Amino acid sequence: MENKPTYEELELKIRKLEKQIVSYSQAKESIRKSLEKHDRVAGINSEPEMALEVLDQENTDKQPVEQALIAEHIFRRTIEESIPSGIAAVDRQGRQIYVNRGFCEMIGWSEEELIESQYPYKYWPAEVFDLPPQNIQILIRDNNASEGTEMPFVRKNGEKFWGLVTSAELKDGDGHTIGYLMSVADISAQKRAENSMRDLSSRLVNAQESERKFVSQELHDGVGGKLTAIKYSLEKLISELDPDSSSLRSSLIDVLAIVHDTIGETQRIYRNLHPSILDDLGLHAALRSLCREFREIYKDIKVECHFNLSEQRIPECLKILIFRILQEALNNVAKHSQADNVYVALDQKADTVGLMVQDDGMGFDKNMVLTENIQTRGLGLRSIEGRTSIFGGSLEIQSEPGEGTAIRASWPL
């Protein structure tokens, strides 16, 4: 059985046939005119088969198979060259086998400079070179075509930009994979807008935390101080009462109990507004205090904490953020999970710091909850998502009905 030609052999044959039968520009102009005429008459967009009809009409003495090959190749190239997104392809050995005009204009190198080049490619910066070739192929071929993967690129002039990469496998006639095709869209403007929004959000959060801290101090020094003075005055008054004034003593003791409760509630409010323990003793102490308070309120839920990260490694701007996320996560556990056990961990993996909150509660359908509107879904997960993303972090939620929930927020160090 005769072996089928390779992709490169077929490409060379087509180029030779183009020169022998009809020039590229002549065929393209004929196709264009015919397509325009067809559009006007039929009122629809022309299909690739139109190219075959044109060449059949103008080259009736040529071989039909050769006409079909050339027409299909010319039409495909015309479409590919008109696409604004960059298109590039590599074979299974990592050799560059195709680029379109949009890709060349995007990165600044010509087709001649790129074709036949091997990994590492000119258009990827040093941070991508650190990945081994097999990881690059996995990244390219395994990304989600509907969402894509954000990757850094570098132009010939040294300018860096971000591209959204989607990919698909290249297959031969027998369905065997011969390479991978990438589509690249320049998302630099979008990334700049995202960074600006993130910067604005972080400023707003910092302003909010500053205001919380101010109100907390006012409650502590103002209201808290006056309530404490009232408590001491009542205690002194009770101690100085005549032993025969039992009725008045009893009334004052009841008032003193109310003052005690009010002081406790005020302390709870100003601690929630801003954890002074975070400023005084650090993040680990603040998180342990939060877990301890949770145990005291919800005595049926066991909370276990593990911190495997030096506090000095955590940026100051992240500390209050981590505290707030744990606060919200524990609040969600209390409200919705019906859990018996909660596990809290703060650790470091590679160059990221991560906070995980895991419970053995009732769980939930993640897809349904994350797509609900804010009225039915509530602000819990939305708040955690927003706080995580402010400083470039990522949030991973794992949950199934009846199997508990695990939330992991992580940020690059």
Image (tube, rainbow, N blue to C red):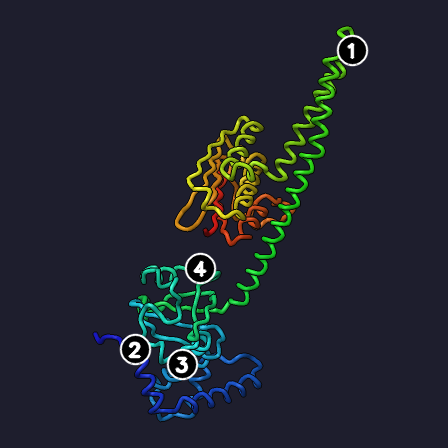
Residue 63 in picture, x, y percent from top left: 33, 88
Q: Which mark is residue 117?
A: none
The residue that appears at 32% across and 87% down in the rendered structure is: 16
**Mark closer to the chain start, 2 or 4:** 2
Q: Which mark is residue 247?
A: 1
The residue that appears at 72% across and 20% down in the rendered structure is: 256
Give the CA separation, mark 2 to mark 4: 28 Å
Q: Classify mark 1: residues with Cα within 10 Å, few (<14), some (14-19) or many (20+).
A: few
Q: Which residue is mark 3?
A: 72
Mark 4 and mark 3 in contact? Answer it, CB < 8 Å. Answer: no
Find numbered disc 4 in the image and state the secondary structure of the residue it sits on.
Answer: loop
Residue 193 in picture, x, y percent from top left: 57, 63
Q: Which mark is residue 8?
A: 2
Q: Which residue is mark 4?
A: 144
Residue 134 in picture, x, y percent from top left: 31, 60
Give the CA separation, mark 4 to mark 3: 29 Å
Locate the N terminus by quadrant: bottom left
Q: Which amino acid, mark 2?
A: Glu
Residue 127 in picture, x, y percent from top left: 39, 62
For residue 117, which quarter of the picture?
Answer: bottom left
Find numbered disc 1 in the image and state the secondary structure of the residue it sits on.
Answer: helix
**Mark closer to the chain start, 3 or 2:** 2
Mark 2 and mark 4 in contact? Answer it, CB < 8 Å. Answer: no
In the image, residue 102 sits, relative to residue 195, either above or below, namely below
Q: Which amino acid, mark 3?
A: Glu
> As drawn, is 242 to the left or to the right of 299?
right
**Mark closer to the chain start, 1 or 4:** 4
Give the CA separation, mark 1 to mark 2: 104 Å
